[in-house]
Image (tube, helix red, strand yellow):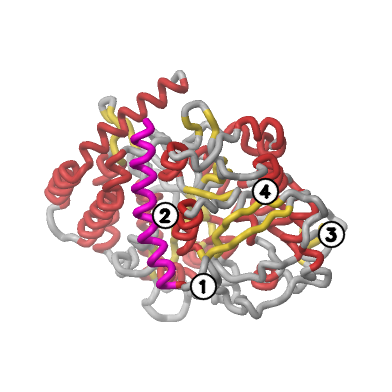
Amino acid sequence: MKMNRTFNLATLRLCVLAAVLALAACNGSSGGSGGAPAASGSGDGGAKAPSGGTSDASKAPAEAPTVTALMSRATNFPEDNLVIQEIRKQSGVNLQVESVVSDDYENRLNTLIVSRNAPDIFRVTKAKLQELVDNDVIMPLDDLLKSHGPNMMENRGALLQGPAYIDGKTYGIPDMWFEGNALAIRKDWLDKLGLPVPTTLDEFERTLKAFVNDDPDGNGLNDTIGLGAAVEVRQTWEQIFAAHGVPQGRYVTIDGKLTPWLLAPGYLDAVKFLNKLYQQGLIDPEFATVPTLQSFEKLWNGKVGAYNFNADGTTQNWLTRYVEEPKPVFAYTYLKGPNGQGGHVRPVMEDSGAYTVISSAAKNPEAAMRALDYLVSVEGDRLTWAGVENVHYKWNASGQFEWIPPFDDAVKLRDAGGYMYSVIINRGSQGLREQLYNDITREARQMVLDHTLEDAYIFGLPDVQKERGTILDDMEKEFRTIAITSSGDLDALYEEFKAKYLAEGGADLIEQATEIYKAEQAARGD
């Protein structure tokens, strides 16, 4: 075992050294803000924290223990702000946070680990968990959770035996979040054309034909798209596969073996249906090449009638993105296929996103857990998401949440520290973010939970998935793209694809996933 640890750590050091050199060449700094993508009006010269946000006030209470954390950020924001000051005050921990642009996060974290300057708190993907445990980089959290994590246990106690539960110990805390990926239909277009909300594939096809051919936007032009989709936007395909009983991206059990979704019964039928839509001009003709943002923009610009994506995007966060006036009206639905199948990919809260961990080198792990425990409390979650009560937001006389201008502008709120620290950890699906969703978004997310597809789930990662997972995924995307646009023999194309997929690692994936599944089932007593 000792020899294996030494080899793994040496491999990590070599990989990180190359990453560090590349990082130094690109940045010339340690995770600074240079090159960070900023929202319009944000950046270093954006709005300052509200009155009271001075540098003196940013100091933690006297004698407060210092805890360091590394987090990723999507946009720049002033790192001395009222929210971090309040976190320190309320938690009693001098939390010092380094934020790094998302694309640089992995390199920065690896650099800190190899230089033995790992932050006390950081987040990792499940692919890294076992390696970090093997090399004693992160510590088990069970005792800390019992002694200093009452809010954490209340919020996530039932979800701790997922991928970060290794050899009987808890090493990481899951995100506790799910996408809420659902099919949105332009309800205003349906009403104009006298159509019901479709619930079957046949009805959906008729709806798309009307959206493409009957001028639903009323501009007199033949310029509308039925189904928006992009091969690089995974979520946009889920409903079509689900209507054929296929949980996209998951395993199913066939003859006692875990089998990838692309080899499941129904996969080819779903592709044939998509081919049928494409041949009739009912799907975005640029689906194979359109970048993610441009795919979204087609919806935002009022040219797409149906789009499958996370509900908190489509009918919540994107409301200001839509250019039409009045704003588009959507309805959510899930489609049933010829065998009555349909639904959504099942959320697995124990294995959602990244995992928050504590470094084994932390000088005060109890303070680190105390800081995390505050962040997942009701008060801490509200603070990291919405800012300081009665400064950034308030509860009105009716008990309803209201933003206080100018913090109804997301850029102004980010510049005051709102949203930003929720990346470290938050209450997940029990937090303020969920509570603030409008009715249609909340109902869509509940629909996802109420109608799920069966799958065969594993927490572990097969070795071949670690080594060749991207290659195998790209093979599926390539086949799907070719098949949807093909006028040839789809059955023959699929047989050729399956043979190649199995030879390139798919057969090993099935065997390794099956062994992991059996071991995990036995460990749970199932």
Which label belongs to residue 235? 2
| Amino acid under disc 3 | Asn
- Find disc 4 in the rendering and name its residue: 431
Rendering coords of residue 102 (x, y %)? 50, 62
Label 2: which secondary element:
helix
Q: Is residue 62 magenta?
A: no
| Amino acid under disc 1 | Pro
What residue is shown at x 81% (from left), y 59% (from top)?
Answer: 389
What residue is shown at x 35% (from left), y 54% (from top)?
Answer: 15
Mark 3 surroundings: few (<14), some (14-19) or many (≥20) residues within 10 A: few
Q: Is residue 175 visible?
A: no
Q: Nearer the viewer, residue 198 or 333?
A: 333
Residue 399 location, quadrant: bottom right
Label 1: which secondary element:
loop
Disc 3 to disc 2, C-alpha distance: 37 Å
Q: Nearer the viewer, mark 1 or mark 2?
A: 1
Label 4: which secondary element:
loop
- For the residues bearing labels 4 and 2, Cβ distance under 8 angstroms: no
| Mark earlier in primary sequence (4, 1) | 1
- Find disc 1 in the rendering and name its residue: 37
Q: Quadrant of the N terminus?
A: top left
